[in-house]
Image (spheres, rainbow, N blue to C red):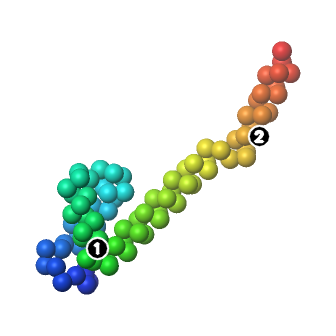
Amino acid sequence: MNCNSDNHQHNCKQTLQRVILALDGELTRDDELQFISDLNICSHCLEKYHIEKEFKLFLTNKIEKKCCTSELKASIRTQLSRLQDGI
Ligand SMILES: [Zn+2]
């Protein structure tokens, strides 16, 4: 793995494993601080973090939209009007 960092403590593999945990908010405070400083010294890890973050946002938006499709709304409206007709 190609890393631009001068810091020999930095471990790309370890940092990348933390990306998902960080995005899920599952890092401890100490881990999070270490993770952020890792991102600051390594552009490769920072780039990967941004890609994962965008992907997660994309998925979140997709799921939210799925809950409120116009088809679903139309279906609910139809069911409601059927219920009203039945009374
Ligand atoms: Zn790195």
> Mark number for residue 40?
1
Residue 68 falls in image quadrant: top right
Q: Amino acid at mark 2?
A: Ala
Residue 35 position, x and y percent, is 25, 64
Residue 42 falls in image quadrant: bottom left
Is 7 situated left or right of 71 in this image? left
Number of disc labels: 2
Residue 37 position, x and y percent, is 24, 69
User: Is disc 2 placed on a helix, strand or loop?
Assistant: helix
Mark yes or no: residue 17 visible.
no
Is 27 situated left or right of 86 in this image? left
Q: Name, please, the residue furthest toward the top.
A: 87
Above or below, 46 against 85 in this view is: below
Residue drawn 79% across the image and 33% down it: 78
Q: Amino acid at mark 1?
A: Asn
User: Is disc 1 placed on a helix, strand or loop?
Assistant: helix
Residue drawn 55% across the image and 54% down it: 61
Q: Name, please, the residue furthest toward the right.
A: 85
Above or below, 79 against 41 in this view is: above
Q: Mark 2 vs mark 1: which is more N-terminal?
A: 1
Residue drawn 61% across the image and 44% down it: 67
Residue drawn 37% across the image and 75% down it: 47
Q: Quadrant of the N terminus?
A: bottom left
* CA distance for labels 2 and 1: 49 Å
For ligand 1, tell me if the residue under mark 1 lies within 8 Å: no
Which residue is tagged 2?
74
